Amino acid sequence: MALADEVTEKKYVKIGNSCVTDPFYLQWLNEFGGRSFWLFGVLNTEQAKTSEIGYYEKYVDDLSTAQGNDGIISKSKELTTTVGASIPADQMDGLTGLFCSPKVKLLVEPNWIAEGVKWNDVRIKTGSLIISQTNKEFYDVSFEVIMPKQYVISE
Amino acid sequence: MSLTIISDPEIQYQAVPLCESKYSSVNRPIIFGIERGSDFSFSGIVANSSTTATVTATGFGAQWYDTVTAGTDFEIEITGSDIPDGTYTVTSDILIGSNSFVIDITDMGLFPGSYTAGDLKIVRLNYRVKTKITVDGTAVGTAVNKLDSSYQTTADISAFLKSSLSYDDDFDYTVNNIKDQKVSNSYIVEFSENWSGYEGTFDQEGTGTFYFTNSVRQLGAEYNGNMADFVVFSETTGIKAKFLSDFEKPSWFEGYPFSLDFVFGDEFNTGTYNIKRHDESFDINGTSIAEVSNSLDKTQDDYINRMTIYESYDSTAQYIEVWLERLALG
């Protein structure tokens, strides 16, 4: 084929290592309007953080029969997962896009080829990124991912 | 209408053959420059005395008799003549057959006699330009702008376009390519003149269809907010479009969904060319193993395209190179 017929750059695509324990596959909208992807591994299982919503005091008119004198409207529950990967130094440029993107998704259907691909929106916890350079060619990266909000019962 | 579009987001990417990019990043200002031109050109002006002058404007009455209040004083702004630029009061009735009218030139210091022609604008109370934005056939909003002293204004429409974006990923990763109208779309703009008591009709004023992408450009970007260097044209010579990846070298993880996205430009000549994706795999020594090509669906043009790669590479492959080529029909 003639060089004159090439209409795009030749994009170098590495074939990455898919053998990851507890895979955690993320997609994000990058700054150019395209999608970027990376396969991480889970380092710590989910950690739940809860908080109260709407504490109030009840009026008690009979102390002998009342079951309580205060309550909360609901609670919120936030799950986070710590993930990480060893990133080749020449690919750290793209990974910074993950931490700058407000639109990140997690692949939640492992059997996506048969069942269809399914994504959930997640958030990268600000300030959780840790990068250490173990050798000249790789960076160890870890960070926390805030999972979709958990629904709870409420008054 | 007397509006002229003096600037728009399109840029000329290549002069010969002409390639123009109409693709803008929606996270940067997307600006149309608008100028109000003359409402009428008059052919002559004669000062009758030191207080009145007759302006000859053939056809003025037929066009304006029912849009200005006949018999009531109204003002016009005259420029480009050798009478002083400024605002003048019209003191004669404007009838349907009027080809001239009288203005008050008291205190202008003009001597009786003839003066050169020029342009005139009718002074409109609370004059404003409205810019209606329509994305893929759906109106998304209207910008309202007042003119500056040079009768110009700019309309930044980027905020209106954002409302039509979303980030749901509906791509099933089973086809070679598909357009993604969640992160890119087309729009048109229409303009109208308006003033107190009058709402004009919208007109595209000669502008065409433009496009926007959910992207952002950085300080120093060569084409400002335009995505020209990412748009795939069929006629560029020596210039190759970039893929929409923030990795210099992205990774594909076997068994996981992956796409390499690009802007399938509206100027790609699908009547003359097909478009094909080429995948060439290489082993650890950089030796080519195999090259395959697949035709892309060229009916998905005009928008950002999600594109899968071949994926059935030899087990010894360490990396691949992916690119797009045009292929002449027949």
Image: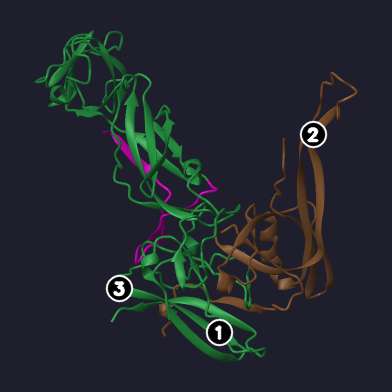
Chain colours: A brown, B green
Question: Looking at the picture, which amino acid does disc 1 mark?
Answer: Ser
Q: Residue B10 magenta-drawn?
A: yes
Separation of disc 1 and disc 3 at Cα? Answer: 30 Å
Q: Say which residue label 1 marks.
A: B312
Q: Nearer the viewer, residue B156 or B92?
A: B156
Element type where label 3 sits in the image? loop
Q: Please, is residue B299 above or below residue B184 in the view?
A: below
Q: Give the residue at x 49% y 55%.
A: B182
Q: Residue A18 magenta-drawn?
A: no
N-term-proximal mark, 1 vs 3: 3
Residue at far front of view: A65
Is there one chain holding both mark 1 and mark 2?
A: no
Question: Looking at the picture, which amino acid does disc 2 mark?
Answer: Ile
**Number of the front mark, 2 or 3:** 2
Q: Chain of mark 1?
A: B
Dots 2 and 3: beta carbons under 8 Å? Answer: no
Q: Say which residue label 2 marks.
A: A72
Residue B159 at x, y percent in the picture? 51, 41
**Number of the front mark, 1 or 3:** 1
Side of A113 relative to B104 (left or right): right
Query: Looking at the figure, which quarter contains the N terminus of chain B?
Result: top left
Q: Nearer the viewer, residue B13 or B150?
A: B13
Q: Which mark is residue B272?
A: 3
The magenta segment: B1-28
Element type where label 1 sits in the image? loop
Question: Looking at the picture, which amino acid does disc 3 mark?
Answer: Thr
Q: Please, is residue B264 above or below residue B274 in the view?
A: above
Q: Give the residue at x 41% y 55%.
A: B22
